[in-house]
Amino acid sequence: MTPLSVVIITKNEESNIAGCVDAVREIADEIVVLDSFSTDKTEQICREKGIRFYQHTFDGHIQQKNRAKDLANHDWVLSLDADEKPNDVLIKNILQLKLGDFPHDLAGYTMNRLNYYCGKPIKTCGWYPDTKLRLWKKQSGAWTGTNPHDRFELFDGQTAAHLEGDILHNTYPTKADMIRQVQKFADIAATHFAKKPLPWLIIKMIFSPIFKFTKNFWIKQGFMDGNVGFQICLYQALEVFHKYRLAIALKLH
């Protein structure tokens, strides 16, 4: 059987980490948590569950996830956030891979992610299938992207296949959680976009939120989820608006 490491990054995840860890016990030969000095009970919960627990100052999602990857002892790694867990179908398919040994010609597997808003699974608003590359060989690639929107990319010449089953993502348990995340992500992204030319930022601030809302509410059928779909699409558009507005403010100061 091929051993598998599950790696998770955390910061004040006492409400999520136990559920995530318990969900992967059946498939994980080790569970590694890299924490950003949580001030809640995250560390206590992890140590009580016998998890390999480390801490490092947070300097970006991409940087932290690459550190977590390097802490894994096994060649194959499943990367999750603390508010995620695999459903039964995904667990079954990962177990089959472990029992049969992973194919030598593949370096990773993509899987769909089902996002939840206020306890409701959302398959509109551009939220599904939300395919992610989360199961991969440790040395086959690295986390890239633009913080806070990270993604794992395989190196040239490496290939991946798709695995059936969903990652269940408790994205926003409440509306207030989404508002806080919109503000947080806008703050992080603004630092990156402040390097762009001012005219470009102004144009993006005006038109990108409109495009974002229109695409997700109408083309991606957010309207099918009624008021919930409207809220999600509105806050997605507001995140886009605020990141460019904040970037302009940073540039002017």
Image (cartoon, grey):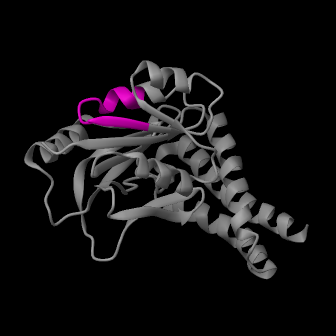
Query: Camera-side residue: 12 or 118?
Result: 12
Q: Residue at x 44, y 51 (%)?
A: 124
| Residue sitting farthest toward the top | 48
Q: Residue at x 41, y 26 (%)?
A: 19
The question of residue 27 being in magenta is answered with: yes
Q: Is residue 37 visible?
A: yes
Q: Residue at x 37, y 46 (%)?
A: 72
Query: Camera-side residue: 119 or 138?
Result: 138
Residue 90's spot in the image, x, y percent? 24, 42
Picture quarter containing residue 176? Answer: top right
157 w.r.t. 188: above or below? below
Q: How many marks?
A: 0
203 w.r.t. 65: above or below? below
Please provide the residue range marked out in magenta.
19-32
Picture quarter containing residue 231? Answer: top right
Residue 94's spot in the image, x, y percent? 20, 44
129 w.r.t. 47: above or below? below
The question of residue 66 being in magenta is answered with: no
Picture quarter containing residue 31? Answer: top left
Residue 119's spot in the image, x, y percent? 48, 31
Q: Residue at x 41, y 38 (%)?
A: 32
Looking at the rendering, in which quadrant would you find the N terminus? Answer: top left
